[in-house]
Image: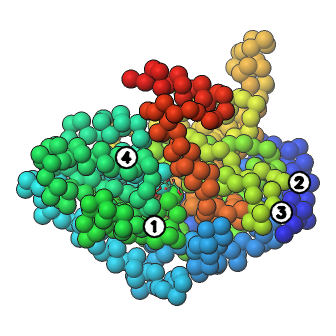
Amino acid sequence: MPSRATLPEWAALRKHRDTIASTNLRAQFAADPSRGTRMAASGAGLFLDYSKHRINNDTLALLRALADACGLRSRIEAMFRGDHINLTEDRAVLHTALRAKRGATVSDKGVNVVGEVHGVLDRMAVCADAIRSGAWRGHTGSRIRAVVNVGIGGSDLGPVMAYEALRHFSDRSIAFRFVSNVDSTDFAEATRDLDPAETLFIISSKTFTTLETMTNAHTARAWLLKAFGGDEQAVAKHFVAVSTNAKQVAAFGIDTANMFGFWDWVGGRYSMDSAIGLSTMLAIGPDNFRAMLDGMHEMDEHFRTAPWETNLPVIMGLLAVWYADFFGAQTVAVLPYDQYLKRFPAYLQQLTMESNGKRIALDGSVVDYDTGAVYWGEPGTNGQHSFYQLIHQGTRLIPCDFIGFHEGLNPIGAHHDILMANVFAQAEALAFGKTPEQVKAEGTPDWLVPHRVFDGNRPSSVILAQRLDPATLGRLVALYEMSVFTQGTIWNINSFDQWGVELGKQLAQRIIPELTSHTPLAHDSSTNNLIAIYREKRG
Ligand code: G6Q
């Protein structure tokens, strides 16, 4: 398969880049008063203003032509149909089936998976209702007042992000905690004020073999049993599991009646809407969880059916390719102006970077163009008082995604207007900057003028929605999932494997026993020395 960079559409974009580089957003807006309303699109309840990007109509047409040349339409169909597009693991990629409507048909290996999906959702709802209503009692008869999700990576980042994002809709009589790190501080701090008699652990692990999660799960078990004088009977009322591995779940001592399954066609970072979302459902209730799934489904349908011109994930994905491959941009900043979305950038880091951090094309060749950018961010307005300096006046080009809502969930005085004014002002300042003439007109002495000039021409998207409710969160998550898919398709990489993460799961295994023994070391001289020092000084 020839490199994407040899496509005539790619070459045309490379050439076109010079035209765009020689103009700026100030001139483009001045020349076209309708640009701000024209370069905007709505879909699945979200609004996207992409007018403040370094593009013109030709750029968009060329990017769409590239999408066609890369077979984006047929790749989308292949994913939704259940083709095994995760080639290296020979798996379907069907997170879209997790939010398919009851009664729909999506098959993998001849089995309609939607029936199974709804079967698990129904069982999760029974469990959630029992815990939320107090019908589920702990070993000593107390109701559950604390839920601790134990998981890492895809089995943690989605649940913790969704819990924080939808906290407004959560049952405040139950505390939710998330333990992921193998650093025992994580477990100790999460449980130090909890009463074992009122605590339920959800052990979330697709494989049920992940070192960190299993270590924390065994620590949780010991913590619980210590409180009950070692009575193993207690485990059944205080542990549930979310996994694809029934054998290991049973071996751990969790009744498989309290196990919620999912499937190998759900990637970890695409699993927050599977049973991995059990903690989310316990927090917000089954109806809100279903609303979140419906929001995702709405975005899936938008992605599958909308023409490229108005297709939000496609527009965002193509713009990401534009900056990564034609402007050398290394990073993308995601800046949600909503405190509840404080973990959203961390969630997106995994979604984007684990999916598209690849240098091998689907045919096994090494790509000769840049792939996935570094994603990062913090909620506004806090970031404005720290790293925005570099975005405004640094030497690097950093496309930004601003995310804002028309309504705040905790309205107090003028707070929300002030918050949103900052979204609009930041995007405006990045695009149009401040000229030397403007700075001088403010009475700035000549020597200070260059320091106070803002070049502008710095690109951003503004994504708006009515309010951050479960459906909106679902739409936002699916928006980014499908943007990632679009990028991966253009780059001709497998966005659904994670061999780099798999390696990390094995690396420490060899060293763990070496730290507590005196066996001779056979690593390189640096690693040998580090282990030797640790052996001598470990507490
Ligand atoms: C996600 C990754 C990875 C995974 C964790 C946890 O796409 O594969 O982040 O989710 O390593 O794996 P388990 O759920 O199997 O414990």
Say which element carries label 1. Answer: helix
Disc 4 and disc 1: Cα gap in Å?
A: 35 Å
The tag on residue 14 is: 2
Disc 2 and disc 1: Cα gap in Å?
A: 37 Å
Kindly tell me whether mark 3's CB lies below 8 Å from ligand 1: no
Observer-side mark, 2 or 3, equals 3
The residue carrying mark 4 is 215
Q: What is the crowding at mark 1: few (fewer than 14 residues within 10 Å), some, or many (at least 20)? A: many
Observer-side mark, 4 or 3, equals 4
Q: What is the crowding at mark 3: few (fewer than 14 residues within 10 Å), some, or many (at least 20)? A: many
The tag on residue 456 is: none
Q: Earlier in the sequence, mark 2 or mark 3?
A: 3
The residue carrying mark 3 is 4
Going by the image, does 244 lie left or right of 62? Answer: left
Q: Amino acid at mark 1?
A: Gly
Q: Amino acid at mark 3?
A: Arg
Compared with residue 297, is residue 533 higher up or lower down, i.e. above or below?
above
The answer to which quarter of the image holds residue 495 is bottom right
Image quadrant occupied by the C terminus? top left
Disc 1 and disc 3: Cα gap in Å?
A: 33 Å
